[in-house]
Amino acid sequence: MRLGALKRHWNRLGRRDPFWAVLTHSDKQDGGWDAGQFFGTGVEEIADVLRRATRLGLAVPRCRALDFGCGVGRITQALAGEFEQCDGVDISNSMLEAARRHNRHPGRCVYHLNIAPDLALFADGRFSFVYSTLVLQHMEPRYSKVYIRELVRVLASDGLLVFQLPSHRAVHEPSSSGAQTPVSGRLPASAFKARLASEQLSLSVRAGEDITLKVTVENRSPCAWPALPDCRGRFQINLANHWLQENGDVLQRDDAR
C-alpha cells in the first residue's frame, strides 16, 4: 500500500475503532476492547521481548526508546514504564489523537506524526531501543526497506533493534472448477466469521526449515466471500498465522500471509 493510501486507511480505522484496528481479535470489534486490557497486552509483549534479550546476553540501556508505527500507543506506553524517555511515531492523525488521550506518561512519552518516507525528524544514533511490530507488513517493500534502514540509522551503537515482518506471502490459485465470486465492494462486519482447522496439531521444526501446513477455512458467516479482488487488488481474503508459546502466550504475530 502506498503511503498516502496508508495514511487515509489508518485515519479511517482510528476514527472508527482504533483499539480493534491494532489488535483485531474477533470478539473485540465495535469498542469491545477494555482499555486496561488492551494496554496490558503491550506491557506483557515488551516484558517478554526484554526478557528474551537478557537470555541472549543482550544488555539494553534503558535510555530512550522508539516505537515505530505506534498507533494508539499500546507499545509506547509499555516502553514508558521501562525507559527514561520514549517516542511514538505514526502516519495517522486519528491514531495519535487517541494515543495522546491515553498517555499516562506525558513527561517522558512523546508522539510524533510522520508522513515522510524516512525518519529525518530524528538524528543518527538517538535511541537505545527501537521496536516495530504489526507495521511494516502494511506497506510496499520499497517503503519498508527504507524504513528499516532508517531504524538502523537512529539506533545507538550499543542499542537493540527489534522489528517484525512476515517472512513471505504465499499465493495459491483456486481450483479452476471452484466458484469465483467477483468482489462488489467492502464486506459487512457480519461477513467476518470463520472456522480454521489444521490437520497437524503439533510439529517440530529446525531453524530455517520450510514447512507446509494444510489449513481448512470455513465461511461461517451469512455472506459469500469473494474469491476475486477488484481491479486494484483490494478486498481479497487473506490467511495469516501467529506463533504461540506452549502456555498460549503470543511468540510472533503475523508470520506468513
Image (cartoon, rainbow, N blue to C red):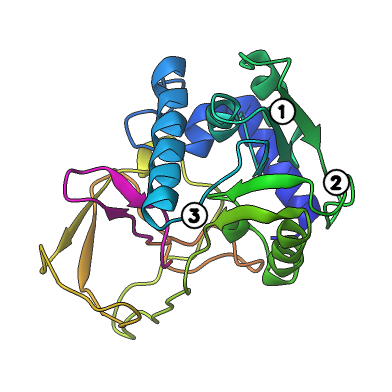
Mark 2 lies on a secondary structure that is loop
Which residue appears farthest toward the bottom when viewing the image? 176
Name the residue carrying label 3: 58
**Above or below, comparing residue 127 to residue 144 in the picture:** above
Choose the circle earlier in sequence order: 2 or 3.
3
Q: Quadrant of the N terminus?
A: bottom right
- Name the residue type under label 1: Leu
Question: 200 and 220: which one is in front?
Answer: 200
Residue 56 belongs to magenta span: no
Q: Residue at x 64, y 38 (%)?
A: 70
Q: Secondary structure at mark 1?
A: helix
In the rendered view of the protein, which quadrant contains the C terminus? bottom left
Q: Position of residue 79 (x, y in %)?
A: 57, 32
Asked whether residue 34 is in view, the answer is no
Label 2 to label 3: alpha-carbon separation = 24 Å
Q: Could you tell me which secondary element the residue under label 3 belongs to?
A: loop
Query: In which image quadrant can residue 144 be found?
Result: bottom right
Q: Residue at x 30, y 83 (%)?
A: 209
Q: Earlier in the sequence, mark 3 or mark 1?
A: 3
- Above or below for 103 versus 218: above
Residue that numbered label 1 is attached to: 96
Magenta-drawn segment: 240-256
Task: Identify the residue shown where x is 83% and y is 57%.
Answer: 117
Residue 122 is tagged as 2
